[in-house]
Image (spheres, helix red, strand yellow):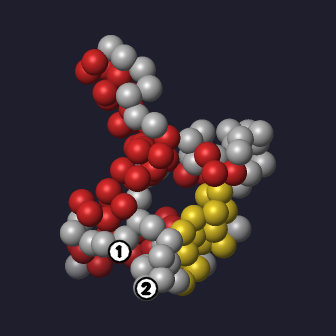
Amino acid sequence: MVDPFDECRQLEGHERLATGRRSLFKPEQLLAAGTSGGYRSIGWEGGAIAVGALADLVVIDQRSARTIGTEPARSWLPASAADVRHTVVGGAVVVRDGAHVAGPARDALRAAIEEVWR
């Protein structure tokens, strides 16, 4: 499963298991780990909205069973990958209304695997 929201929550969960204490990270610290920290981990600059930065964004469904009632700035905390409505990568829309614009992801994955096997 690929779910960056869950990965941020797991960071807190791991530390909770290691220390026996809760709330070791503020939500802002977890968000930074999953955005600018993620970029740094692959040697890139990014993870912030700024002039000249990559336009990599997600729009979260504010009406899902997980996110309804949360304040928009923190709706990523209970969200899952299933709550992503739109995704922009490098300024280009790649997911619109919850569906990849290039078609079903399983088809792209199947084609990529077939190419590797060739």
Q: Residue at x 71, y 45 (%)?
A: 71
**Which residue was labeled with disc 2?**
52
Q: Residue at x 35, y 74 (%)?
A: 112
Q: Nearer the viewer, residue 58 or 46?
A: 46
Amino acid under disc 1: Ala
Sequence-wise first label, 2 or 1:
2
State which quadrant residue 57 falls in. bottom right
Amino acid under disc 2: Gly
Asked whether, in this view, residue 80 is left or right of residue 110, the answer is right
Q: Callout 1: few (<14), some (14-19), or many (20+) C-alpha neighbours within 10 Å?
A: few
Residue 40 pos. (x, y %): 26, 63
Q: Secondary structure at mark 1?
A: helix
State which quadrant residue 60 falls in. bottom right
Residue 45 pos. (x, y %): 31, 72
Q: Quadrant of the C terminus?
A: bottom left
State which quadrant residue 58 falls in. bottom right
